[in-house]
Image (cartoon, rainbow, N blue to C red):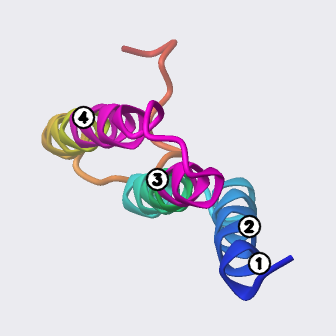
Amino acid sequence: MTPTHFSCYSAFIISITGLSLHRTHLVSTLLCLEGMMLSLFITLSMWPIQLQISSFMLTPMLMLSFSACEAGMGLSLLVASSRTHGSDHLQNLNLLQC
C-alpha cells in the first residue's frame, strides 16, 4: 500500500468516524460528508492513472459534479433549518414534529 493510498483510506475512515461520533451540529455532519466525497474523488482520480486506462477519466468529474450538488443542497437545508428552528443542532430537527 502506497502512502497515497493510505492517506486516502485514512481520510475516508476519519470522515466516517467523525460522521458517526460527532452528530451534534448539521455543519459538522456536512463537513464529514464533504471529506468522504473528497477522499473518494481523489481515489477515483488516482485509479485510472495507475491502471493507465483512459475510459474511466469521466467518472471522477461526474462524482465531483454530484458532490457539488450535494454541497449546495446541504447548505440550503442548513439555512432553511437555522431559519425555522433557530439553530443547526440535530437534536432540534425532529422530522415527526414538522
Left-right relation of 46 to 9: left
**CB of mark 4 within 8 Å of CB of mark 1?**
no
Of badges 3 and 4, the one in the foreground is 3
- 35 on left or right of 79: right
The residue most toward the right is 1
Residue 6's disc number: 1
Determine the CA span between mark 3 and mark 4. 23 Å
User: Can you tell which mark lies on residue 41?
Assistant: 3
Q: What's the amino acid at mark 2?
A: Tyr
Cα–Cα gap, marks 4 and 1:
33 Å
Alpha-carbon span between mark 2 and mark 4: 29 Å
Q: Earlier in the sequence, mark 1 or mark 3?
A: 1
Crowd tier of the residue under label 1, counting other residues whose Cα lies within 10 Å: few below 14, some 14–19, many 20 or above: few
Residue 77, numbered circle: 4
SS for tag 4? Answer: helix
Q: At 45% across and 30% down in the image, what residue appears?
A: 55
Q: Residues within 10 Å of mark 3 (few under 14, many from 20)?
A: some
